[in-house]
Amino acid sequence: MNDQIKLDFQRPERLGLDEAILCARKSDAQLATIMNRVLEHGVRCLMTRLDPEVFARMARTHRERLDYDPVSRTAYLNWIPAAELEPPRIAVVSAGSSDMPQAAEVMRTLTYLGASTKQFIDIGVAGLWRLMERVEELRTFPVIVAVAGMDGALPSVLGGLIPGVIICLPTSTGYGVSNGGETALHAALASCAPGLTVVNIDNGYGAACAAFRAVNIIRRAVEEIL
């Protein structure tokens, strides 16, 4: 089994972000092997889709090295917070409080990567005044992750109001014809707001990485100008 696990320790040099471990469908033994290898190399690791019951079964020596959050189901292994953060350049905008698990995965991933963020909660289009109260502030962010389930209308509205990069994160929040997030996904893909980027349903990690890549490119461009 150990020979089946091949970790990508060179990814930070290639991409500027390190490999994350998807914990779903991995056995306890596989996760233990992965954590041991990460610790042996003296590096850090982000673990995603780590359910509370799986975390509870881990050896105490492993749990003590993890910063675990049950809402986002993420854990930081061997992680040290950034000593100094820039002012937030990424806004994470949630349509409703029911989207908190997915938004939390975005926030936790960006925190792990050292990217400062600001979160806007429960400003979906069902009460449009809540969004309009924050539009001027949202316009100051170069990158926005829009988190929405149900009819998935929030990204399209933001796309018509906000000039920055908008990354749509459709969520499985909802019921009936929301169909596990497919309605929100299709709404984002079919949006008439120009230039939206869309990730898969509930893929908070992927949305965070897209936002991180965008901010890194912006930072490099500014540094070259200066």
Image (spheres, helix red, strand yellow):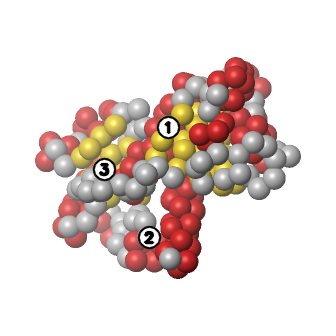
Identified at 76% across, 37% down, the residue is 157
Q: Is residue 141 above or below residue 215?
A: above
In the rendered image, which residue does mark 3 sit on? Answer: 76
- Crowd around label 1: few <14 · some 14–19 · many ≥20 (10 Å): some
* Residue 137 x/y as whole percent: 59, 40
Q: In this figure, which residue is indicated by the disc labeled 1?
A: 119
Label 3 to label 2: alpha-carbon separation: 17 Å
Residue type, numbered disc 2: Gly
State the SS at label 2: loop
**60 or 4, which is in the foreground?**
60
The disc labelled 3 sits on which kind of residue? Tyr
Check whether the beta carbons of the residues at disc 3 and disc 2 lie within 8 A of each other: no
Label at residue 16: 2
Q: Residue furthest right?
A: 192
Secondary structure category for the residue under label 1 = strand
Using the numbered discs, state the Cα–Cα distance from disc 3 to disc 1 in whole angstroms. Answer: 20 Å
